[in-house]
Image (cartoon, grey):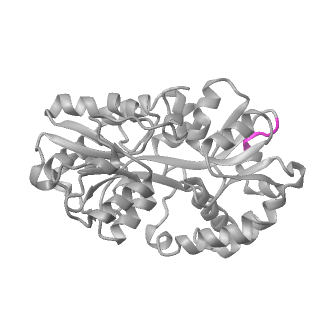
Amino acid sequence: MSRHTSLRLAGASALTIGAVALAGCTSGAEESDPNTLVVSTFPFGVEQMEEAVFEPFTEETGIEIEVATGSNADRLSQLELAGGVNPDVDVMMISDYYAALGQEKGLFQQVDEEQVPALADIADFAREEAYAGPAYSYQVNGTLYRTDELDADEAASWDLYGDDAFAGRLALPDISVTAGQLTVSGVGATYGDGPYDVDTAFSTMADWAPNVLQFYSSSTEVTNLISQGEIAAAVSLNGFATDLIASGEPVAWTAPESGAYMATNRAMIPEGAANVDAAHQFIDYLLTAEAQSASADLVGDLPVNLSADVPAELTDVVGDIAADPEAAGYATLDPAELVPTRDEWVDRFAREVAAQ
C-alpha cells in the first residue's frame, strides 16, 4: 500500500502518538500542560500525518502533540458526553458533516481568525462561515472507471448509470458514506431542481438500481470490484483512485460533467478545550504551504492552501482540479440543509433506492 490517500480512506487500524486513546484521556483543563496539545483525528494515516505535520509543528513551536483517534461519530459522542467541560481534546480533525452536527449541539467554538494568519492563504471554500473552523483538506466526487471499457466522456455522464448495457456492472455509494451524499446531490442538481432535491435524486437512482451491482459502504469494496473487473464504473471520491492508477491498473477517474460536489475535513476547537492558544497555533501551522505540501505528499490530502505543492500521484487522478476545485466547477454543500434532514434521508435512501 502506498503512502497516499488510501491510507486515509481504507480504514486501517489506529496508530497513536503519546499513547492517548479516545476514551481514555484524563488530562482535564485544570491539569493541562500548555506545552502539550491533544489532537483528535481519524484512525488511519496517523503515522504519515505525524511525519508530515505533527513532528514539524513540535520542532517549530516546542509544543508536544498527543493524538486521540476514532471514528467521526465516536469522537463527536465523546465531546457530547463532556458537555463542553474538560473535553480532553484541543483540536479535532473531523469531516464537514460531523463538524456541522457538533456545531449544532454547541460542541465547538469559533476559531479566532486573528490568531490564524494562514487563513489568508487558503481557498475561499475552506473559510466558509457555515463552519466554526477551517477546512484543511478536501475530496472531490466523480467516477472511477475501467479504461478498457469506457472513455472519459462516457464516464463523466450521469446517464451511464441508467445505461442497461452496463446492467449489473456498476456501483454507487450508500448515502451513509461521504461520497453518497455528494452523489445524491449531484443527481438532484443534474436531473432536478438542485443539490437538495432528493425526491428527484431518489426516484432517478431507484430507476438505476437494477443496473447497480452494489451500493458500497467502504473504499475497499469498490476498489476491489473495479480492479477485479466485476464492475466497469462507480461513483467515488478521488482518493479511491490514487493507488489503482499509480499501480498501473487500467482505471482512471473523472469529474462529472454536472453536479460536481466536494467534501472537506475541518480543524475544529472544542468548547472547553484546555489549550486554546496552542490549538490556534496548530491550526495556523496546518494551513501553511509547508504543512499542506507535506500532507499532500505523505498523506494524500488535497491541499486547501493554493500555494502548496501537489504531488504527481494526486494530479494524475484529478488533474487541474487540484489547483482550484471551485474554478473546475466543484462546490460544497450547505450543512444547514444536511444536518436536520440526515436521518430522514438515510432512511428514505434505504427504502426507496437501495432496496429496489
Which residue lies at the image location 14% right of the left edge and 50% below the top edge?
277
Q: Quadrant of residue 208?
A: bottom right
Residue placed most toward the observer, 111 or 190: 111
- Residue 28 coordinates in the image, percent (x, y): 17, 53
Find the magenta span and give its range. 149-153
Q: Residue at x 63, y 74 (%)?
A: 193
Image x and y of residue 27, in percent: 18, 49
Across and down, in percent, residue 110 comes to 24, 62
- Residue 348 seen in this snapshot: yes
Magenta span dominant secondary structure: loop
Q: Is residue 151 magenta?
A: yes
Horizontal and vertical percent position of residue 240: 60, 40
Residue 242 left/right relative to 133: right
Viewer-closest of 45 and 180? 45
Q: Residue furthest right?
A: 165
**Residue 7 lies in magenta, yes or no?**
no
- Asked if one can make out residue 308 in the rendered structure from this viewpoint, the answer is no
